[in-house]
Image (cartoon, rainbow, N blue to C red):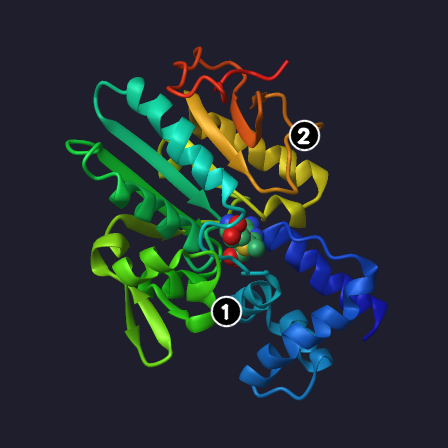
Amino acid sequence: MTVTDFDFICQILKQRSGLVLGNDKAYLLESRLLPVARKYRLASFEDLVRLIRSKGDEAVIKDVVEAMTTNESFFFRDTKPFDQFKQIVLPTLMAARPNKQIRIWSAACSSGQEAYSLAMILSEMSAQLAGWKIEILGTDLSTEILDRAKEGIYSQFEAQRGLPVTLLVKYFTQTGDRWQINQKIRSMVQYREFNLLNDPRSLGRFDVVFIRNVLIYFDQPTKTRILGSIARRLVPDGVLMLGGAESVFGLSDAFVGQAGLKGVYGHAKGAKPVPPSRPSLPLTAAS
Ligand SMILES: C[S@@+](CC[C@H](N)C(=O)[O-])C[C@H]1O[C@@H](n2cnc3c(N)ncnc32)[C@H](O)[C@@H]1O
């Protein structure tokens, strides 16, 4: 692979998805893009680059971008954010929403495990949530991964990963060696293709935004830009949930950390949040 070809593809990836690849990732580029080359009946990575340079075909470019994204996800990933959502974020919002409506955005949702984990939490709380309208929107750049999310079919490995067996038995049906999440849970989540580099205004406003394990792939200006867009979509007392390796520190002053809650942020200009029912984990700004 020539440096020019590597740089050419890296430039496309950065422009189209925000993904930044280090110079040591040439092997990754080649191994992930060889199947794309084969799909277009090309013999090599070099031929694929030549095709893109000569024709600039959007479908090929989309395949290249999607092949380079990392789609790893699992149910109740990192556990704690979901406990915090259930025990603190949701009760706080419920106390502050006389209209009984809450909108949740699972941004960069991959194959849907995050959105469905939230849907299962809500389903388990159905008695408390009677009369509430809670929307969950899952978005991702990749059409292919969204098709998987909509189907809600997971391998044995995926179904076991992070999912308590009681929920697996209650909400999934086994077909062969795969498990499909039931229609009721699937119907609680809407999916839509959305690139985080674009303006999210058309998605509406949200009370909670989960954007986890995706900002890590972007450079600092891109992270800042995306966090700024999200801040404008989050209602004043809304909550932002980031992944374990992510933070707003040095990137955005639109958010403030919540004391004792790692990865949970409130709007810096937000209305004072309603104190949660659990005084040990107050949803207040960290000092
Ligand atoms: C590692 S997965 C994270 C999935 C889930 N949020 C989680 O934490 O388990 C990252 C996802 O981000 C998506 N992605 C990458 N760049 C994106 C962009 N610019 N816009 C929207 N989604 C993007 C990928 O397609 C992939 O599905």
- Answer yes or no: is residue 102 visible: yes
Q: Which residue is mark 2?
A: 251
Q: Residues within 10 Å of mark 2 (few under 14, many from 20)?
A: some
Give the quarter of the image for residue 178: bottom left
- Where is residue 15 drawn, in percent x and y? 63, 52
As helix, strand or loop, the secondary structure at mark 1 comes to helix
- Front position among marks 1 and 2: 2
Q: Judge by depth and name the residue closer to the eye, 82 or 97.
A: 82
Which residue is at a point 62% across and 86% down the rendered structure image? 42
Q: Which residue is mark 1?
A: 59
Give the CA separation, mark 1 to mark 2.
33 Å
Are discs 1 and 2 less than 8 Å apart at CB? Answer: no
Q: Is residue 182 left or right of residue 191?
A: left
Q: How many marks?
A: 2
- Where is residue 183 drawn, in percent x and y? 22, 59
Q: Is residue 226 above or below residue 266?
A: below
- Answer yes or no: is residue 144 visible: no
- Report the amino acid beneath label 1: Ala
